[in-house]
Image (spheres, rainbow, N blue to C red):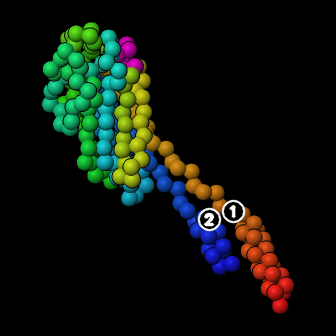
Amino acid sequence: MTAIIAASISVAVQAQTRHAATVTLDGNWYLQAGAVVNQSDAGILVTGVTYAMGAQVDGAGVWEDYLSDGRHADRLAGSSTHYSTQMWSGLQLASQEIWSFGGLDLDRIVHASTGEVDSQNLDFSGASLRYASVQVKFSDGYCAQARLAELGWDVTQVLHIGEAVAPVPEPAPGLMLTAGLGVVLFGRRKAGRQA
């Protein structure tokens, strides 16, 4: 009986764990800089950020090698200088800490099949961001992402990433008491039969 009551109490005490981050992409720099704020519960770190332009199709955004740190991935075929995914790993961003990044050079794919890129004209329609997203990885392995809005490169975007894991509902105190009394009465009845 003690085990059942202890199990009921532990279910009632389980706390909610919140994984959350806010990513700001600075339109003043045409999406070349930004910041991440870890808004998770204490003890949950942000350990990685991935900023991806997505599908390599005509008209989509693409990064050009420039001054950014981190790792470049998904090179554009036919281009030695353009890629679609920027990744930062090994971060240890504690709750309420801010991490900033910069040095990203955003261009637009003209012809994906040949690797031709337009690096002279800015996209004020936002169509080049139609596949773009930012993903945040947390220290317990949880990952969450948000898609960018199709806005011009000169518009600052603020993305709220993550979700709260719903807490286990607490059983009503009356239900717990009834269950405990039921176990006691059932145990006494069973003991009475054996005598």
- What residue sits 39% from the left and 33% below the top? 158
Q: Amino acid at mark 2?
A: Ala
Image disc number at residue 12: 2
x, y percent for residue 16: 53, 56
Q: Amino acid at mark 1?
A: Pro
Span highlighted in magenta in the image: 124-130
- What residue sits 66% from the left and 73% below the top? 4
User: Is disc 1 placed on a helix, strand or loop?
Assistant: loop
Q: Are marks 1 and 2 in contact (CB under 8 Å)?
A: yes
Instruction: Verify whether residue 87 appears in magenta.
Output: no
Q: CA distance from mark 1 to mark 2?
A: 7 Å
Residue 46 shown left or right of residue 168 in the figure: left
Q: Is residue 51 above or below residue 192?
A: above
Image disc number at residue 38: none
User: Is disc 2 placed on a helix, strand or loop?
Assistant: helix
- Which residue position is annotated with label 1? 171
Residue 116 shown left or right of residue 46 in the figure: left
If you read the primary sequence from the N terminus, does the residue marked by circle 1 or circle 2 appear first?
2
Closer to us: 154 or 66: 66
Residue 127 shown left or right of residue 33 in the figure: right
- What residue sits 25% from the left and 48% below the top? 90
